[in-house]
């Protein structure tokens, strides 16, 4: 039976310090892939991968488009790209900014919900504004697990507070208690997968490509239907003309 092997963590202001503590206290043999999104300026050349690797038993790297997920690894959303999980691979999305950010947390969490359902664990840490709340809702709806840092414990409580207002998370904990909790959760069997609204898949595709394959397929159906109607109308006109003659 599959375990909860997708651990997707989002943070913003105050997040570097929180991530250093959290990842530094995860076990070397963690049976999950760790996905991180933190708001980074598009022009930034960050050394966050080296910093996390130096403090953690888990190797950290900026994600590469199309690479295969491995357990006991940390994958970081690079500047100016959304981090999308798709099956056993990662995709770097070029879709529009969300919550004034790219990378944004919501696309990563939503993709975990669409892709992995009950295998996904979504985590929102310290930060400002509302990024992450919508993505946590999607993970919860899909049968995954949701975790929020206690706002009273967060350097910037707005993002955790917004998540609490949008979702009734499974766990609300202080940062110091989170490594132990997450270690326990990733060893649990995956939750039962639940059906998501099609709009969530639509949003993931927009984040990945800037357009929606679902919308394009439906437009093809409309266009084909219109062509059939046009042909039928032409046949009717021809029949009327023949009858008049």
Image: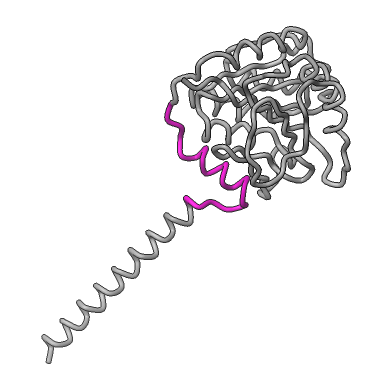
Instruction: Judge left or right: residue 200 versus residue 79.
Output: left
Q: Residue furthest bottom?
A: 245
Residue drawn where x is 63% and y is 19% of the image: 165
As drawn, 218 above or below 189: below
Q: Where, by quadrant of the figure, is residue 232 drawn?
A: bottom left
Q: Position of residue 171 (x, y in %)?
A: 62, 11
Q: Position of residue 44 (x, y in %)?
A: 87, 43
Q: Position of residue 41 (x, y in %)?
A: 84, 41
Q: Where, by quadrant of the figure, is residue 235 drawn?
A: bottom left
**Residue in the foreground of this view, choosing between 124 and 179:** 179
Q: Residue furthest front?
A: 29
What stretch of residues is rendered in magenta? 194-214
Magenta stretch secondary structure, dominant: helix
Q: Decide whether residue 71 is among the magenta residues.
A: no
**Residue in the foreground of this view, choosing between 101 and 194:** 194
Instruction: Judge left or right: residue 51 versus residue 121.
Output: right
Q: Decide whether residue 207 is among the magenta residues.
A: yes
Residue drawn where x is 81% and y is 24% of the image: 15
**Residue in the foreground of this view, choosing between 220 and 166:** 220
As drawn, 181 above or below 56: above
Instruction: Judge left or right: residue 199 versus residue 23.
Output: left
Number of marks: 0
Residue drawn where x is 50% and y is 20% of the image: 190
Instruction: Judge left or right: residue 49 versus residue 163.
Output: right
């Amino acid at each position: 039976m599959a375990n909860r092997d997708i651990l997707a963590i989002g943070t913003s202001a105050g997040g570097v310090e929180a991530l250093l503590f959290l990842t530094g206290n995860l076990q070397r043999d963690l049976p999950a892939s760790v996905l991180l999104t933190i708001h980074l300026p598009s022009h930034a050349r960050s050394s966050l991968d080296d910093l996390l690797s130096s403090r953690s038993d888990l190797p950290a790297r900026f994600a590469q488009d199309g690479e295969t997920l491995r357990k006991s690894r940390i994958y970081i959303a690079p500047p100016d790209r959304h981090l999308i999980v798709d099956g056993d691979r990662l995709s770097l999305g070029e879709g529009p900014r969300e919550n004034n950010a790219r990378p944004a947390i919501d696309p990563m969490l939503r993709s975990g919900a669409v892709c992995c359902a009950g295998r996904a664990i979504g985590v929102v840490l310290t930060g400002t504004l509302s990024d992450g709340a919508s993505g946590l809702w999607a993970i919860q709806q899909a049968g995954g697990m949701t975790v929020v840092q206690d706002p009273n414990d967060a350097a910037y409580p707005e993002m955790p507070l917004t998540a609490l207002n949008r979702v009734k998370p499974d766990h609300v904990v202080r940062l110091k208690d989170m490594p132990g909790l997450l270690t326990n959760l990733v060893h649990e069997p995956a939750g039962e997968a639940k059906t998501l609204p099609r709009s969530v898949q639509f949003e993931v595709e927009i984040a990945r490509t800037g357009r929606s394959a679902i919308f394009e397929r439906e437009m093809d159906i409309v266009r084909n239907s219109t062509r059939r109607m046009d042909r039928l109308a032409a046949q009717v006109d021809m029949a009327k003309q023949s009858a008049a003659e």
